[in-house]
Amino acid sequence: MSLPQLSICIPAYNRPDGLRTAVTSILSALTPAQTAAIELVITDDSTLATPQVECLLHGWQGAWQYHKNPQRLGMVANWNQSLAYARGEFVLLLHDDDYLLPQGIPHLLHTLNCYGSRYDVFLFGVHLVDGQGHCLRKQIPPRARWLPPATAVRQLLSHSSFVRFPALVWRRSLLARVGEFSHTYGEATDIYQWLRFFATAGVYTVPLATAAYTIHDQALSMGMFQPQTLGHLSAIFQEARQLNLLPPRVLHHAQRDFLHQFILAGTWRFLRRRQWQQAAAVYRLLEAPEVTGRSPRWAVTRFLFGVALRLLRVDQA
């Protein structure tokens, strides 16, 4: 029996409705001719019962695996467990609060059929959606092109949102070359993994949206805006320096711009939710030593957010 072309791995945790949506988005998009090309792998780290998942998969003719972890593994270990079960030539890690768009699988398979023999890593576009599935904006690569390692790393480390998790597909064998997701960098571990992927294989960008990336109050990323995360990100930049792909000056400016974008994005999330004190706490991270100077690119946004917090009379001291 031939191996699947693409394993879609869903490391689930306590989002039964989201998991149902993610699974349905895959099954509903597949034609009979595409079924053999796809494998679905679910590792369930939930403390909640999710029996409906196996009911959804029952009768589907494609390859699938459902594994309920006997003990909770935690976020990163569950990601790695899901990937360890995968058998496909390529893998996509789909969180259980994200889902594939109707044309996602056709776009994925067409791209892999055309370019899978030439490239190891692919970056697609996403729709950024809220918890109700309403599209907030689209993030799609401007054109199809291959970014060699140095260029790919520079893009990754200059823009904190360059890669949205469900937008990346990589050759499964690449994990054996660079290693699995690391526990060292906490919730920033995905950035470190993409750094290793890009430094090894570059990335081919595809101007097609394949997935919806959810931004909501329960998203793991809401807890990222902490001093500890800045320490992890700074350590990742130090790892990038050891690669000698980019000049020190370029990495210095990249770290400055990356952390500005990251912190200001967190500030905006709390401002939008009218949580003024939390917004101010995140904004104060701009004074952390890891932020290597002021970013001209983000100067206006930084100024406007500072003015807004002062007008709201939120203590920034």
Image (cartoon, grey):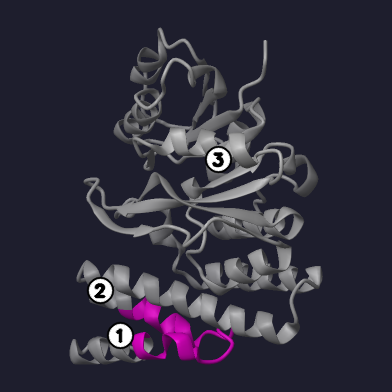
Q: Residue 63: which numbered mark, if any?
A: none
Q: Magenta part mainly helix, strand or loop?
A: helix
Q: Earlier in the sequence, mark 3 or mark 1?
A: 3
Q: Position of residue 198 (x, y in %)?
A: 68, 58
Dot in front, 2 or 3: 3
Q: Is 16 above or below relative to 294?
A: above
Residue at the far top: name it.
59
Q: Position of residue 36 (x, y in %)?
A: 54, 17
Q: How many marks?
A: 3
Mark 3 and mark 1: Cα distance apart in space: 41 Å
Where, quadrant-wise, is the N terminus in this rendering?
A: top right
Residue located at (45% from left, 76% from top): 261
Q: Tell which of 49 and 170 is nearer to you.
A: 170
Q: Which residue is mark 2?
A: 271
Residue located at (28% from left, 77% from top): 277
Q: Residue 111: which numbered mark, if any?
A: 3
Residue located at (74% from left, 76% from top): 246
Q: Which residue is mark 1?
A: 305
196 to the left or right of 18 = right
Q: Tell which of 116 and 88 is nearer to you.
A: 116
For label 3, the crowd category at 10 Å Cα-Cα, with few meaning under 14, some 14 to 19 and many 20 or more, is: some
Q: Earlier in the sequence, mark 2 or mark 3?
A: 3
For label 1, the crowd category at 10 Å Cα-Cα, with few meaning under 14, some 14 to 19 and many 20 or more, is: some
Name the secondary structure under disc 2. Answer: helix
Query: Magenta residues, as a range?
Result: 280-301
Q: Tell me whether circle 1 and circle 2 mark residues in contact (CB < 8 Å).
A: yes
Q: Position of residue 144 (x, y in %)?
A: 54, 55
Q: Tell which of 70 and 306 is nearer to you.
A: 306
Amino acid carrying mark 1 in the image: Phe
For label 2, the crowd category at 10 Å Cα-Cα, with few meaning under 14, some 14 to 19 and many 20 or more, is: some
